[in-house]
Amino acid sequence: MIGKIKAYMMPIAMAIGIIFHRYVGELSFLTPYLIAIMLLITYCSISFRELHFTRLHLWLIVIQVAGSIVVYLLLLPLNHIVAQGAMICILAPTATSAPVITGMLGGSVESLTTYSLLCNLTIIVIAPIIFAFTGEVDAASFVNSFWIVFSKVFVLLFIPLFGALILQKYLPRVHHEIQKAKSLPFYLWSVALIIITGKTVQFIIDQENPQFTVEISIALIALIICIGQFLIGRRLGRIYNDTIAGGQGLGQKNTILAIWMAQTYLNPISSIGPGAYVLWQNIVNSYQVWRNRKGI
């Protein structure tokens, strides 16, 4: 029964968020805490001694950062909200659940885990710079804008890593107990998805001048970016004999974090991009798992 509910949890969570948007949107302050707890549990499950950085990881980082900037600049003349929505879909770090899917597909979990960690550390530095130029942070200068974003992103992404290292060294029993809670991140993800879906719907409803063409464009561009990132990642991974990890590393995104960043530092409507990406990447992953089970 629980297994069946898990299989349909994404549409269930999004439906709850849409129906009860006026209520769950008020809980948006919980989102960063949920993200931090999910990351802490993930990092506690990592064996840092088994992490090995490769050229593939560096190329994926370059594509992720440079690609987000290039796509933003290309779409900016058309519409800045569309440009922001597309950018965050590329800039977003790898999903915490990506190693699980990678393992199901027969890929290198260690390689994907290494890239996920590198990706999060890169975002701590790069995201504040990019958002200071492209975002809508209310600040007097670039330095001020950078610091506002950096201070929050640093706490959100680095503290869980630091906490996992401290627990591993000084409180191994607590660290071991946290490792047992492998299913907890899924439920936290579901709660976070309900909240951010509700907040996104509320943003759309509260628009004084709805721009449905813009919103549909963002969702469709997110689809193109999603498929493109999976294909590029797999193509690059094939060169380094790490096809699956390459595809999942670049294609499977931490959409909860991406939506939170979009709603916090960009135009809130741009969060439709990673919101739609949730659906697109789950379709891609379901298709990949189906092909793998069929031996295609």
Image (cartoon, helix red, strand yellow):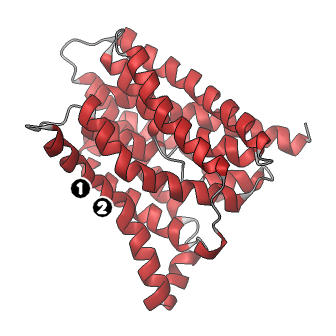
Furthest residue in direction right, as rendered: 295
The answer to whether one can see residue 21 in this image is no
Residue drawn at x 54%, y 48% as measured from the top left? 94
Whether residue 8 sits left or right of residue 290 in the image: it is left
Residue 228: give x, y in percent of width and height: 63, 26
Whether residue 288 sits left or right of residue 46 in the image: it is right
Toward which corner of the image does residue 287 lie, by quadrant?
top right
Residue drawn at x 45%, y 58% as measured from the top left? 188
Residue 173 versus residue 111: which sits nearer the camera? 111
Helix, strand or loop at mark 2: helix
Q: Quadrant of the C terminus?
A: top right
- Residue picked out by circle 1: 151
Furthest residue in direction front, as rendered: 55
- Residue picked out by circle 2: 155
- Is 161 placed above or below 259 here? below
Residue 236 versus residue 185: which sits nearer the camera? 236
Residue 13: give x, y in percent of width and height: 47, 43
Residue drawn at x 22%, y 20% as measured from the top left? 207
Whether residue 81 sits left or right of residue 183 in the image: it is left
Toward which corner of the image does residue 19 lie, by quadrant?
top left
Helix, strand or loop at mark 1: helix
- Say which amino acid is labelled 1: Ser
- Is 17 placed above or below 222 here? below
Q: Assess disc 2: are there few (<14), some (14-19) or many (≥20) residues with their C-alpha within 10 Å of its C-alpha.
A: some
Residue 79 versus residue 121: which sits nearer the camera? 121
Residue 248: give x, y in percent of width and height: 65, 44
- Is 30 placed above or below 265 here? below
